[in-house]
Image (spheres, helix red, strand yellow):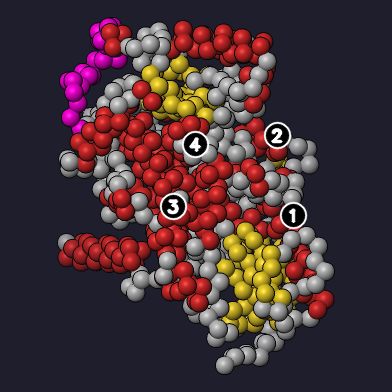
């Protein structure tokens, strides 16, 4: 039975953001609620703007307000960057739509990058409107575009920028931020922040400020041969320091094919690196080439493309057809295996830093993809500050946004080249989710926070995930035409969650189970902003007695003698390690009680690596749990906390009245 509601007389108009323009629309479009053969759905208007595709439901009422509602992207809104593929249905046959169309479809199916599937029936729409809306949607969401044509720029120049947006997230765009981070991790003993690249005079890929070993002179960075610096950085960039003084560093790999002069320059430069790094206190260094020890970006992209097909379900019949062979289909995608390998690599690096007290140098072609994943994971596992909301956001800023991860290319926001596309940032969020669901009390944020963060990749009103580097962002905003009435505009940052959610919805991003760290004595507390004193005790027995607190001052010589005696050759490569050393470290940690503010190692054996159900299954009704699972539990606990607080207030009020 087809329930046809008479179109209502009232005019339904889209809610437009500042800078948003209506480009084309079509009336009497029928949106199926779900393709289960019943043809249930509702009539409305389908519109396309320079920001989104939106369906305006004629029959929608404001009674069913969602508890968790996004203020920017509604339930029936798809941002242009979130469109994955568009199919047309011709005589019950599905066909991928690209370029110019000779014949227009009777049904439109839009697959989204956040895994929603929209089915629109165009049979009852005027032919002219069908042509306009279908070609408009295809053109604005699928064809290559220029960076300046992104809605990001229209919004930034039209919107009043009255939000501070920092909300305790360290942005790492000033020298002071890097110095504070060095001080917080006690890395300032061996490393220093440099200003060599101010104005991007060394490299366009490097940020304006970064951290290098203290004995690397600024002149030596400035004098690097041009071919070495233009593509990426061939200096050891500091990521983080462990409590025992061991540090995590990253560096680009040298190009494989090069002429004799270039290879001589490379040899001289590597000798220089060795002379620097072999001086105390850097003598033990383990180099790990991630390009050879982890899957390639192409493998990651292929696995994720296969994996997401399991969740882009058109109809109920498809769901039950795949359900029978679900586990074999899941295994054949190889996505969970990639997550396992990445987590295993992060544990190996953590073992070097923690137990072997060895510096680790991560090497990758550009040092902006898998280097970002591993260095971020290691910090989440080893530094409890990175497990707080502001700490995790600061980590993403430091390693990804300022660190030069090419979000624009990897997310293919401009539809320039599919070859560059790879879900590297999503891979990190999937790995962090494994830790969040294995150790909920260790994290201040929830899986809902991670899901919302993954959705924000496709919302082009925030600059956070829409540039390849800091240089690209700075040059894009320096143009004369990009001025507002109130002066040069500022982009919004995704970390200001109030732009997308009201306070009640933001509560779902915070974990009510979080085991907060006991506060230190007032005498020890520092007044500095954004400082986080790390607890150094880890649930791990060490082979030798731990370093005393004076290690950074008087006992350095003693340590150098110890380490020099054990050094074998110039560098220790990861392949030289015995595999049982990893297993021993892993099993030893898991045999002890978990310290939620110390080292955290994910469980990676067998079925411990799970599918991030909230992100991938949220749009499939057949896959939903009765009762709502963990998110419903969290909501109940939040309600209970509210009730307890209001009762406490009433009691305080009664008490004060009695007095």
Numbered label attached to residue 186: none
Callout 4 secondary element: helix
Judged by depth in the image, the label closer to the viewer, 4 or 2, is 4
- The spot of residue 241 in percent (x, y) is 37, 25
Give the CA distance from mark 4 to mark 2. 26 Å
The image quarter containing residue 138 is bottom right
Q: Which residue is mark 3?
A: 450
The answer, for residue 559, to whether it is visible in the render is: yes
State the residue position of label 2.
475
Q: Is residue 390 left or right of residue 136?
A: left
In space, the residues marked 1 and 4 are separated at their CA atoms by 29 Å
- The first of marks 1 and 4 along the sequence is 1
Q: CA distance from mark 2 to mark 1?
A: 24 Å
Judged from the image, the secondary structure of the residue bearing numbered disc 3 is: helix
Q: Is residue 65 left or right of residue 467?
A: left
Asked if the residue under mark 4 is in contact with the one under mark 1, i.e. CB atoms within 8 Å, the reply is no
Q: Quadrant of residue 525?
A: top left
- Residue marked by disc 1: 143
- Judge depth for marks 2 and 1 and give the one in front: 1
Q: Split into 4 quadrants, where in the image is the C terminus? A: bottom left
The local crowd at label 3, few if under 14, some if 14 to 19, many if 20 or more residues have their Cα within 10 Å, is many
Residue 265 on image: x %, y %: 61, 10
Mark 4 or mark 3: which is in front? Answer: 4
State the extent of the magenta-drawn residues as a range: 538-562
Q: Position of residue 294 (x, y in %)?
A: 46, 36
């Amino acid at each position: 039975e087809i329930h046809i509601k008479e179109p209502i007389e009232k005019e339904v108009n889209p809610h437009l953001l500042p800078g948003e323009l209506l480009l084309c629309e079509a009336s009497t479009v029928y949106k199926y609620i779900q393709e289960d053969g019943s043809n249930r759905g509702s009539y409305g208007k389908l519109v396309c703007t320079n920001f989104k595709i939106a369906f305006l439901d004629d029959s929608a009422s404001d009674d069913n307000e969602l508890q968790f509602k996004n203020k920017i992207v509604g339930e029936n809104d798809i941002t242009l960057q979130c469109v994955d593929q568009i199919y047309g249905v011709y005589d019950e046959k599905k066909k991928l739509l690209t370029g110019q169309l000779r014949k227009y479809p009777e049904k439109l199916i839009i697959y989204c990058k956040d895994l929603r599937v929209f089915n629109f029936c165009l049979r009852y729409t005027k032919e002219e409107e069908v042509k306009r809306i279908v070609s408009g949607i295809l053109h604005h969401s699928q064809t290559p575009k220029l960076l300046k044509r992104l809605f990001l720029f229209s919004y930034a120049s039209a919107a009043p920028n009255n939000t501070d947006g920092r909300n305790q997230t360290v942005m790492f765009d000033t020298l002071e931020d890097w110095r504070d981070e060095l001080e917080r991790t006690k890395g300032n003993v061996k490393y220093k922040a440099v200003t060599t690249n101010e104005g991007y005079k060394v490299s366009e890929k490097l940020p304006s400020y970064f951290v290098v070993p203290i004995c690397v002179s600024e002149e030596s960075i400035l004098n690097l041969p041009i071919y070495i610096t233009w593509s990426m950085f061939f200096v050891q960039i500091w990521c983080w320091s462990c409590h025992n003084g061991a540090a995590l560093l990253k560096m680009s790999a040298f190009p494989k094919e090069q002429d004799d002069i270039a290879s001589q320059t490379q040899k001289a430069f590597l000798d220089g690196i060795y002379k620097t790094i072999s001086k105390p206190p850097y003598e033990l260094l383990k180099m790990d080439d991630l390009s050879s020890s982890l899957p390639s970006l192409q493998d990651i992209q292929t696995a994720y493309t296969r994996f997401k097909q399991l969740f882009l379900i058109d109809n109920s019949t498809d769901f039950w057809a795949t359900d029978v062979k679900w586990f074999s289909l899941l295994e054949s995608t190889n996505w969970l295996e990639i997550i396992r390998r990445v987590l295993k690599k992060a544990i190996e690096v953590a073992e070097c830093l923690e137990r072997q007290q060895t510096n680790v140098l991560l090497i990758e072609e550009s040092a902006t993809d898998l280097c970002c994943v591993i260095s971020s994971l290691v910090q989440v596992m080893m530094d409890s500050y990175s497990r707080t909301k502001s700490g995790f956001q600061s980590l993403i800023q430091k390693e990804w946004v300022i660190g030069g991860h090419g979000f624009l290319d990897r997310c293919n926001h401009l539809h320039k080249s599919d070859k560059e596309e790879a879900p590297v940032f999503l891979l990190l969020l999937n790995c962090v989710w494994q830790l969040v669901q294995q150790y909920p009390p260790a994290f201040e944020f929830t899986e809902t926070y991670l899901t919302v963060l993954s959705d924000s990749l496709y919302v082009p009103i925030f600059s956070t995930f829409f540039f390849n580097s800091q240089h690209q962002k700075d040059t894009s905003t320096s143009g004369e035409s990009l001025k507002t009435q109130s002066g040069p505009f500022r982009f919004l940052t995704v970390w200001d969650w109030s732009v997308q959610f009201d306070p009640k919805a933001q509560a779902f991003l915070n974990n009510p189970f979080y085991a907060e760290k006991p506060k230190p004595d007032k005498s020890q507390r520092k007044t500095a902003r954004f400082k986080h004193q790390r607890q150094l005790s880890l649930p791990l027995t060490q082979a030798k007695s731990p370093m005393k607190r004076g290690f950074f001052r008087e006992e350095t010589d003693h340590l150098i003698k110890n380490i020099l005696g054990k050094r074998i050759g110039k560098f220790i490569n990861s392949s030289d390690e015995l595999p049982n050393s990893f297993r021993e470290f892993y099993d030893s940690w898991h045999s002890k009680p978990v310290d939620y503010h110390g080292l955290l190692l994910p469980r990676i054996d067998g079925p411990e690596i799970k599918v991030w159900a909230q992100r991938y299954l949220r749009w499939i009704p057949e896959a939903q749990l009765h009762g709502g699972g963990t998110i419903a539990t969290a909501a109940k606990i939040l309600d209970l906390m509210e009730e307890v607080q209001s009762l406490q207030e009433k009691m305080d009020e009664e008490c004060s009245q009695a007095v």
